[in-house]
Amino acid sequence: MKRAKSVRGMSLVEVAAAAVVVAVSLLGTTAAIVSGAALTSKTRYARAAARAGAAILEDVRATDFADVQTHFAGKRFTIDDDETGAGSGYADVTVRQVDNGSTTFQVYEVTVFVHFPALTDREIGPVVTWVCNRVDGSALGGSTPLPGANAGANAGAAPNGAGAATDPNAGGTR
């Protein structure tokens, strides 16, 4: 009489296939965790860079137009960002005069590049603004006052005459 075969477990091939599936799954999970950690780090640096660049540009806007070149052109500022844990870095500032077609008003483009050596000295930015020496509320291209501007008022400009714009004729920053 023949004996029936008993099933006692998995074959060696089945065990090897299961081990390969588990290994591939673990490698994929590990890669996702490492990638997520790197992205979190880059986000922390980008947030710190944006904050540092904005702070420098606020200082530019708070400075009298006549002093912008002297105080900011070609300067390097140290950044210590303990709040986000980004650590130390630096910001390089360039100031260049923009040809705006006006003989009355001058416009400077101020650019800030932020660097964090922990990111293999990769620069983050640029953060850019424009400042103008107009204080009478008129447009750069002509003598038409801005809507709602009183004669001699600082409409569209900061109290010290420095204003920010996405272009020399508009408001806002980029």
Image (cartoon, grey):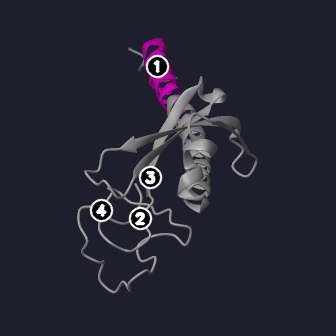
Q: Position of residue 147 (x, y in %)?
A: 29, 83
Image quadrant where one finds the C terminus: bottom left
Amino acid of disc 2? Arg
> Mark 4 — residue?
140
> Mark 3 — residue?
129
Count of numbered circles in the view: 4
Report, in whole angstroms, how far the alpha carbon at label 1 lies from the one at label 2: 70 Å
Q: Earlier in the sequence, mark 4 or mark 2?
A: 2
Amino acid of disc 3? Thr
Q: Earlier in the sequence, mark 3 or mark 1?
A: 1
In the figure, is residue 131 to the left or right of 93? left
Q: Nearer the viewer, residue 86 or 109?
A: 109
> Mark 2 — residue?
134
Q: Residue at x 40, y 73 (%)?
A: 136
Q: Position of residue 161 (x, y in %)?
A: 50, 66
The span shown in magenta is 9-29
Image quadrant where one finds the N terminus: top left
Q: Nearer the viewer, mark 3 or mark 4?
A: 4
Q: Position of residue 12 (x, y in %)?
A: 48, 12
> Mark 1 — residue?
20
Mark 2 element type: loop
Please rate how many residues cluster around mark 4, counting C-alpha atoms within 10 Å: few if below 14, some from 14 to 19, many from 20: many
Pointers 1 and 4 in contact (C-beta within 8 Å):
no
Mark 1 element type: helix
Q: Nearer the viewer, mark 3 or mark 1?
A: 3
Report, in whole angstroms, how far the alpha carbon at label 1 lies from the one at label 4: 69 Å
Residue 29 against residue 80 in the figure, above or below:
above
